[in-house]
Image (cartoon, coloured by chain):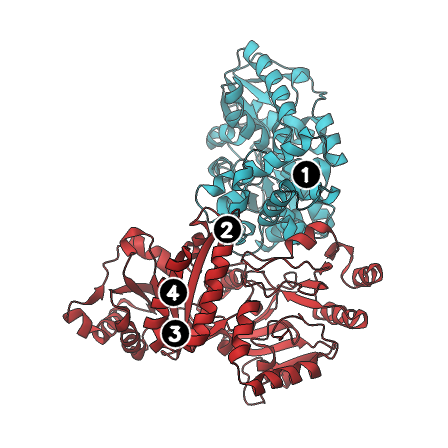
Chain colours: A cyan, B red
């Protein structure tokens, strides 16, 4: 297994479980299960024990390995320089080892199978390619969000098209689940189509797609300028006009791991919200690099390994959002939107807290429903 | 065991009981060098009532119970030496009360140092608690129960000295409150009642399960600073420490000696951490500390190291992340230390002994001492790094630790949170009547011998 040589270097000091300000646990699987086995250090020691044949590969060990949501909190807060950069790579390598051996939980297998399917309608021939991604294509809530973002981009005169039915999964979840061959297949097909169409600039709906196309596709021959839609809308909205007759709204923003910790993009979403008069942006206790993951990454939105537990990261996150005094929890990721909206219902907080995607908030406050200074 | 499992599930729920090999493996050891000892079950209670019921079930089944905080003691005290249940307390992590006026915090036993620190910073910025050098996931109860020390220990003593009261589930299942909380709603002090907290401090979890505790809080200075006093001769250190602590200006004084980084090799450093609410007060304190060791500065045999701001930052970090990084010295993810509680006058001998053992056993080392109280004693640490993937290296560290423990006891010190071999060294030298009293107390408290058996016992 790749990175097997670093596993013994984890001291299990536990910094990886926390945000930088120590307010609470910040590792979604550990938050959900609370056994040390589900912490990054515990997982690391178990993988080593498995490779050294000190323990058997059981269903539970598979679950422990696949429960990592790839949020990157451990990488951000591990105290050992250099070693920390390889933590997530080691976890993904362990997943890959399981995938290659055909020893994955059924939920992971089903999820990986679905990634090869697509039902999106086709658009094309614009300045940007808008990449919808898995949740925007398959999930009903994701589709709503995709439509809202498309609307917002259109009304701000952004010229874009879609791969449509030709778009298949961006492969990020396959990559995070260690299915490297499937990832290479998916990415390869996308790259072939994108290159054939002469695509140079891509806007993604999902931070997951943003991350993988920006950071992994170049190694496979896919070199594009990649933007998350918030990076396009943030400057465009500075010229927009908004309704002045609406009551003020207190909003808190949930940093997506794939925009924030993985790509250091913290500003655009806040800039989008800042452009809207009447919105008061309040920060949660864990934000920016300390943000708590929603728990949906690494395929967990689809596999449900984490969200079947009593106290999940998503539930903790909506409680934290309510504690901040916000009426709306804004998200820039369809996966986060699904995870957090579900959590708000389970926590019985959905009357106090609305989980809304960024463009939905913006669209609801534009001067006329379908007009801005630009469009 | 199946029946026991079912009973535990009815108490804490199926989500929080495991008899699976993965949990049994991970909970069989801590990051130190002690060999693994696997529990049969891991249980995570969420309330005192759940702890009480688990203890009752364990008594009925005559099965051991080992309470666990963050599992960072490094000396293997939370291993299930005779199997049984590991009681992982970290779900019980609520901060129940901060009393601003009487300056105390009441917390559940699984509350971490980091969580309390963050809570105080946000809601009570004028207050702080004494944090150990352990990572922030370390629990407050765990550290108090082992007589830990921390960044206010020069000013206020051991963390067990800062304890106001306890709630404990006894080995027979009764819930007991000790301290002012036994007769009052306020957890303000252990006095004036008979101080029974000692029944649960230093016993390595062999006398009960702490479920709540109140600790003292202290005013948080607006400005914090650090000075580093350096000399080469270990014989001077006791007097230097005596003079500095005599000023009572600092909150924390820690001596350290390490071959890495290169600039530190061969020198003895004393970090003096102090705080103030104004620049004037800070300068006044600094001058008093300097004046206390002027004699050495004038003779040019010791002096304060010039410290740029960037260099001060790691010394002001609470807890100090840099200390954890010692585990990576051999790129092997491991270190363990003997923390010897001993009088300060033993510093030169302790230092020489540490160097000698490190040289003989060829281990990577770091030595140091935290002053407890106004030079009342010190926790002299002998930290040895090892490569977890190299059995020979681990064995070298184990040998160094055992030799150090023996040397410490022979010198007149006492290993802190002692590993099993060190416990035996201590017992060897202990007044036999004290040992007999310990055994009598335990037999009364724990007639079925279920609490962390194997610790503080003679074979």
Residue placed farthest to the top in the image? A196
Camera-side residue: B221 or B141? B141
Return the x and y of residue B182 as percentages of the image width and height.
64, 84
Mark 3 Cα-neighbour bin, 10 Å: few <14, some 14–19, many ≥20? many
Q: Chain of mark 2?
A: B
Residue placed farthest to the front in the image? B360
Q: Is residue A365 left or right of residue B369?
A: right
Q: Work out whether A116 lies above or below B426.
A: above
Any mark on residue B154, and which?
A: 3
Determine the CA span between mark 4 and mark 1: 50 Å
Of tags 4 and 3, which is closer to the observer?
A: 4
Any mark on residue B354, and which?
A: 4
The image quadrant of residue B88 is: bottom right
Determine the CA span between mark 4 and mark 3: 23 Å
Q: Chain of mark 4?
A: B
Camera-side residue: A221 or B60? B60
Determine the CA span between mark 2 and mark 1: 41 Å
- Mark 2 or mark 3: whose residue is earlier in sequence: 3
Of tags 2 and 3, which is closer to the observer?
A: 2
- Residue designated by label 2: B392
């Amino acid at each position: 297994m790749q990175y097997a040589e670093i596993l013994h270097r984890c001291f299990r000091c536990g910094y990886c479980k926390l945000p930088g300000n120590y307010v609470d646990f910040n590792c979604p699987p550990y938050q959900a299960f609370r056994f040390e086995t589900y912490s990054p250090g515990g997982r690391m020691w178990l993988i080593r024990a498995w490779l050294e044949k000190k323990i058997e590969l059981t269903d539970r060990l598979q679950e422990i390995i696949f429960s990592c949501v790839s949020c990157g909190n451990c990488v951000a807060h591990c105290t050992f320089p250099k070693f920390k950069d390889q933590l997530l790579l080691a976890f993904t390598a362990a997943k890959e080892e399981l995938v290659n051996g055909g020893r994955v939980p059924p939920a992971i297998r089903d999820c990986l199978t679905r990634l090869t399917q697509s039902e999106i309608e086709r658009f094309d021939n614009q300045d940007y390619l808008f990449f919808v991604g898995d949740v925007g294509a398959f999930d009903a809530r994701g589709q709503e969000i995709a439509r809202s973002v498309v609307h917002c981009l259109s009304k701000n005169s952004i010229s874009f098209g879609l791969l449509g039915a030709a778009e298949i999964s961006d492969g990020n979840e396959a990559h995070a689940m260690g299915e490297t061959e499937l990832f290479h297949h998916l990415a390869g097909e996308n790259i072939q189509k994108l290159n054939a169409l002469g695509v140079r600039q891509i806007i993604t709906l999902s931070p997951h797609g943003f991350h993988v196309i920006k950071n992994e596709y170049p190694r496979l021959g896919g070199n594009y300028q990649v933007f998350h839609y918030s990076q396009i809308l943030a400057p465009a909205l500075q010229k927009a006009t908004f309704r002045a007759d609406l009551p003020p709204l207190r909003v808190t923003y949930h940093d997506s791991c794939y925009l924030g910790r993985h790509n250091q993009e913290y500003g655009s979403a806040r800039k989008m919200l800042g452009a809207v008069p009447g919105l008061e942006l309040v920060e949660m206790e864990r934000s920016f690099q300390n943000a708590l993951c929603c728990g949906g990454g690494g395929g967990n939105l689809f596999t449900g390994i984490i969200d079947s537990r009593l106290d999940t990261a998503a539930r903790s996150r909506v409680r934290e959002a309510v504690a901040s005094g916000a009426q709306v929890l804004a998200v820039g990721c369809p996966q986060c939107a699904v995870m957090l909206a579900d959590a708000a219902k389970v926590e019985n907080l959905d009357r106090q807290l609305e989980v809304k995607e960024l463009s939905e908030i913006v669209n609801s406050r534009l001067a006329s429903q379908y007009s801005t200074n630009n469009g | 065991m199946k029946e026991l499992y079912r009973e535990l599930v009815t108490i804490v729920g199926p989500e929080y009981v495991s008899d699976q090999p993965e949990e049994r493996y991970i909970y069989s050891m801590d990051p130190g060098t002690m060999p693994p000892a696997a529990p049969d079950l891991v249980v995570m209670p969420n309330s005192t009532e759940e702890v009480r019921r688990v203890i009752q079930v364990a008594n009925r089944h005559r099965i051991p119970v080992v309470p666990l905080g963050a599992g960072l003691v490094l000396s293997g005290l939370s291993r299930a030496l005779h199997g049984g249940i590991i009681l992982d307390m970290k779900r019980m992590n609520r901060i129940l009360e901060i009393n601003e006026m009487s300056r105390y915090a009441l917390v559940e036993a699984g509350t971490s140092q980091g969580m309390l620190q963050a809570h105080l910073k946000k809601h009570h910025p004028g207050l702080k608690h004494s944090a150990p050098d352990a990572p922030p996931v370390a629990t407050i109860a765990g550290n108090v129960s082992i007589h830990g020390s921390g960044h206010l220990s020069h000013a206020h003593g051991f963390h067990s000295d800062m304890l106001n009261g306890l709630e404990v589930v006894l080995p027979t299942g009764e819930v007991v409150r000790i301290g002012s909380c036994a007769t009052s709603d306020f957890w303000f002090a252990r006095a004036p009642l008979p101080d029974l907290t000692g029944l649960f401090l230093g016993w390595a979890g062999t006398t009960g399960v702490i479920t709540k505790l109140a600790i003292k809080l202290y005013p948080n200075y607006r400005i914090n600073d650090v000075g580093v006093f350096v000399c080469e001769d270990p014989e001077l250190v006791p007097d230097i420490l005596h003079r500095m602590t005599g000023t009572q200006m600092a909150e924390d004084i820690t001596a350290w000696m390490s071959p890495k980084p290169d600039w530190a090799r061969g020198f003895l450093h004393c970090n003096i951490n102090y705080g103030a609410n104004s620049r004037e007060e800070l300068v006044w304190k600094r001058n008093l500390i300097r004046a206390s060791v002027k004699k050495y500065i004038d003779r040019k045999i010791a002096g304060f190291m010039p410290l740029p701001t960037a260099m001060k930052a790691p010394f002001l970090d609470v807890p100090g992340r840099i200390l954890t990084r010692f585990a990576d010295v051999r790129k092997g993810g491991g270190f363990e230390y003997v923390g010897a509680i001993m009088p300060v006058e033993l510093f030169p001998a302790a230092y020489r002994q540490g160097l000698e053992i490190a040289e003989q056993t060829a281990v990577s080392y770091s030595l140091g001492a935290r002053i407890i109280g106004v030079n009342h004693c010190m926790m002299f640490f002998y930290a040895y790094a090892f490569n977890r993937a190299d059995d020979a290296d681990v064995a070298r560290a184990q040998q160094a630790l055992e030799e150090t423990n023996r040397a410490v006891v022979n010198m007149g010190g006492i290993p802190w949170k002692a590993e099993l071999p060190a416990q035996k060294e201590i017992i060897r030298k202990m007044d036999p009547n004290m040992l007999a009293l310990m055994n009598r107390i335990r037999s009364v408290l724990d007639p079925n011998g279920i609490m962390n058996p194997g610790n503080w016992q003679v074979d």
